Amino acid sequence: YIIFTSGSTGIPKAVQVRHKNFTEFMCSLIYGDVVNKNDTILQIARCSFDVHVQDILGTFMIGSSLIMLHPRGIMDVDYLASVFKDKNITCITTVPTIIHNFFTYLQQHNYNKVAQYLRSVCSGGM
């Protein structure tokens, strides 16, 4: 597949992600025990972000369970908290802002057990 980066120039550039690169990346996540077949992965990223492919195809590649939010579900922290709790989410990949806002919300509302199964958090971007 192809992603577009803005690079340092601000001009979008097409970059090919080859099948081998993607599978090796997923294998490295498995080897490092970031994800495994027993995980329940919450797909948070928008389809315009590269991690969206990792969440969906990568989850199916390793045999994990994938949970997808309803449209704009990431903006509803009560809904997001209920998904975490009800689906026993173990892995997420998202930007630092969402991690900070969500876990601050959980702390402020004493929702201590909502993310009790979460074992892997990957973050990048802004």
Image (spheres, rainbow, N blue to C red):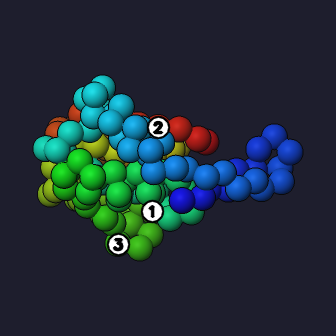
Rendering quarter of residue 27? top left
CA neighbours of label 2 inside 10 A, class few (<14), some (14 to 19), many (20+) = some
What amino acid does circle 2 point to?
Ser
**Mark whose residue sits in front, 3 or 1:** 3
**Can you tell which of label 2 and label 1 is closer to the viewer?**
2
Which residue appears at 44% of the width and 69% of the height?
72
Is disc 2 in contact with disc 1, using a CB cutoff of under 8 Å? Answer: no
Depth check: give the residue in front, 39 or 112: 39
Asked whether residue 118 appears in the rendered view, the answer is no
Amino acid at dot 1:
Met
In contact (CB < 8 Å): disc 3 and disc 1: no
Q: Residue at x 17, y 44 (%)?
A: 37
Q: Nearer the viewer, residue 118 or 51?
A: 51
Secondary structure found at label 1: helix
Residue tagged 1: 75
Depth order, front residue of 16/44? 16
Tell me the number on the disc at residue 41.
none
In the visual, does 75 lie left or right of 69?
Answer: right
Classify the position of the N terminus by image quarter: bottom right
The answer to whether 75 is drawn above or below residue 11 in the figure is: below
**Residue at the spot x=60%, y=58% of the render?**
2
Answer with left or right where residue 107 lies relative to residue 46. left
- Closest to the camera, between mark 3 and mark 2, is 2
**Residue position for label 2:** 123
At numbered mark 3, what does the secondary structure look like: helix, strand or loop? Answer: loop
Pointer 3 or 2: first along the chain: 3
Q: Which comes sooner in the sequence, label 2 or label 1?
A: 1
- Residue 70 numbered mark, or none: 3
| Residue pictured at 83% horizontal, 50% vertical | 10
* Picture coordinates of residue 89, whole percent (x, y): 22, 48
